[in-house]
Every structure is written in structure tokens, then in C-alpha cells.
Amino acid sequence: MERDFTKIKRRWGEQAIESLLLAAALAAIAIVAGIIYVVVSESAKFFAQVSVVEFLTSTTWTPLFEDPHYGIAPLLTGTFMATLVALAVAVPLGLLVAIYLSEFAGARTREIIKPTLELLAAVPTVVYGYFALLFVTPLLQNLLRPLGIELPGFNLLSAGIVMGLMIIPYIASLSEDAMRAVPRAMRDGSYAMGATRLETAFRVVVPAAVSGVIGAIILGMSRAIGETMIVVMAAGLMATLTVNPLDSVTTVTVQIVTLLIGDTAFDNPKTLAAFALGMLLFLITLGINV
């Protein structure tokens, strides 16, 4: 009798835990659905007042002017150029760090470097913004001035470089985890064929861990696309349609913040444009992850 009661009690406990886990999963789905509903419904109000064609094809973004224009081309260009500069910095450095930690560093060295590297991910982005504005930009100006290039105080290059430094921990840490998951037998087989540790790392380990490495890069890319403070403080607020990294630009996230600063009335296209930009950013990041 006591044994049957114990079984019933255990079964109830398992069912309670399963119900709790199901509720947590459904809550996550409900939150995502709520976010999508808010963004889509408010964006619909915006597109009821502004043409979708103008939004997608116009090259002028001046929502706060007396004669407003809502072309997203300058914002998309600035966003993608900043992300490309960031990836050009973060991907090579992040992968090199990951290869060193996975294949060459000793256990004690790895225990010191990896936690220190991951601490960089906890640094507030406003600190990175100050670093870009007060250190990286003057440094680049001093380096480019002898070449006859006058770098403005707000520019895409310094913002992109610091964004790249910011996402190095994401790429390095996740890539290192993927490389360490490669079976030891693959390394031993490579060594048996006469390959060096460097050849094994680049020709065996990295190709075997490529799916995890790509996932790390995509995560870093998504993080760079959604960055705001570094761009505000280092690249400026000017919506310029350019692919020159030396120019001042702005991004989608920066303009969302700009449109929602101060007293906001959610019944005019100037404010509703922030929701349209949010929906665009959501679709971009969703597409990248898919």
C-alpha cells in the first residue's frame, strides 16, 4: 500500500514538473507572439499613412523635418556597412583566438584567457562607445592624416571596429566550444598521417566544426546589427546613403531610439515609423538566423 502511494506521489510530481515545463515553453511562445502582434499592428498604422513603395525605395530619411521622407535605404546601408566592418574585425580575430584556445593553449592558460575573454561580453556598450569616440577615432585620425585623409569625428570605421571588438567574445567562445567537440580520433588520425598541429587545426578541426563556427558568426552578426550605443556615439545620426566607411552614417536601431525620444504620440507617422523599423529589423535578424 505504501509502495503504491509512493508511485502515485512520484507520478503526480512528474506530471507537475512536465506541466511547469510546458507552461514555460508556452510562455516563451506567447511572448514572441505578443511582440510580433505589437510590432505588426503598429506598423500597419504607419503604412496606412505612408506608402510602402516610398518606405522601401526612397533614398531620403528625414522623418523629423517639416517635409518628412521615410526612405530606409540610408539606414539599411549604414546598418549593413557597420556590420560588415565589425565582422571583418571579429571573424579573423575570433577564429584565431578559438583555434589557439582549442588546439595550442594549455589547461591553465585556457582557464585564464577564456573567462577573461568572456568578460568582454559583459562590458556595457556605452563604455565601448566612449572607447570608440575618445580613443579609436583620434587614433585613426592620426594614422590617416599622413595619407592625406581627414577622418571626421563621427565615422563608420571607428564604430565598426569597436563593434567588432565587442562581438569577438561571442565568436571566439562559441567557436572554441565547437572545435573542442571535434573527436580526438580525428586529430590523432591527422597526426598519424604526418600533419603538424597547425595543419591539423586548419585542415581537420576547423572544417569539422564549421557548423558551430558559422552559428557563432551568425550570432555575432545579429548582435552587431542590433547595436545602438556605439553607433550613436561614434558614427553619428546623419542618414547618409554611402558605402564609404570614412563617412558619418546612422543605423536602423539608432533611428528607432531617435524617433522615440521625448514626448511620443503614437498617432503620427513620425513615431509609428519606429515600429516599422522594428519590424524591418525583426525580419532581417529572423532571415539571417533562418
Image (cartoon, helix red, strand yellow):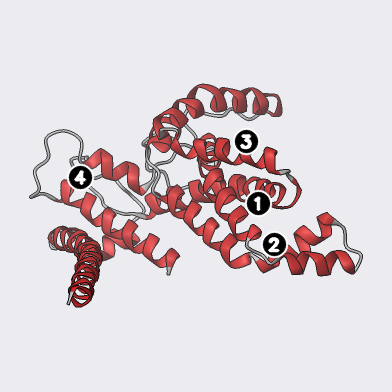
Q: Left or right of 186: which side holds 176?
A: left
Mark 2, secondary structure of its residue:
helix
Nearest to N terminus: mark 3 or mark 2: 3
Comparing labels 3 and 1, the label whose residue is closer to the camera? 3
**Can residue 256 be seen here?**
yes
Q: How many marks?
A: 4
Q: In the rendered structure, are the residues bearing label 4 and label 2 in contact, judged by CB atoms less than 8 Å apart?
A: no
Mark 1, secondary structure of its residue:
helix
Nearest to N terminus: mark 2 or mark 1: 1
Q: In the rendered structure, are the residues bearing label 4 and label 1 in contact, judged by CB atoms less than 8 Å apart?
A: no
Q: Amino acid at mark 3?
A: Ile
The residue at the point 65 percent across, 59 percent down is 179
Nearest to N terminus: mark 3 or mark 1: 1
The CA distance from mark 3 to mark 2 is 23 Å
Q: Left or right of 171: which side holds 39?
A: left
Q: Amino acid at mark 1?
A: Leu
Q: Residue 9's x, y, as percent?
A: 19, 70
The CA distance from mark 3 to mark 1 is 18 Å
Instruction: Please name the residue that numbered disc 1 is placed on.
Output: 95
Q: Left or right of 113: which side holds 279?
A: left
Q: Residues within 10 Å of mark 4 (few under 14, many from 20)?
A: few
Nearest to N terminus: mark 4 or mark 2: 4
Comparing labels 4 and 1, the label whose residue is closer to the camera? 1
The residue at the point 8 percent across, 43 percent down is 265
Q: Is residue 148 above or below residue 86?
A: above
Instruction: Please name the residue that numbered disc 2 is placed on.
Output: 206
The CA distance from mark 2 to mark 1 is 9 Å
Instruction: Please name the residue that numbered disc 4 is placed on.
Output: 67
Instruction: Please name the residue that numbered disc 3 is placed on.
Output: 112
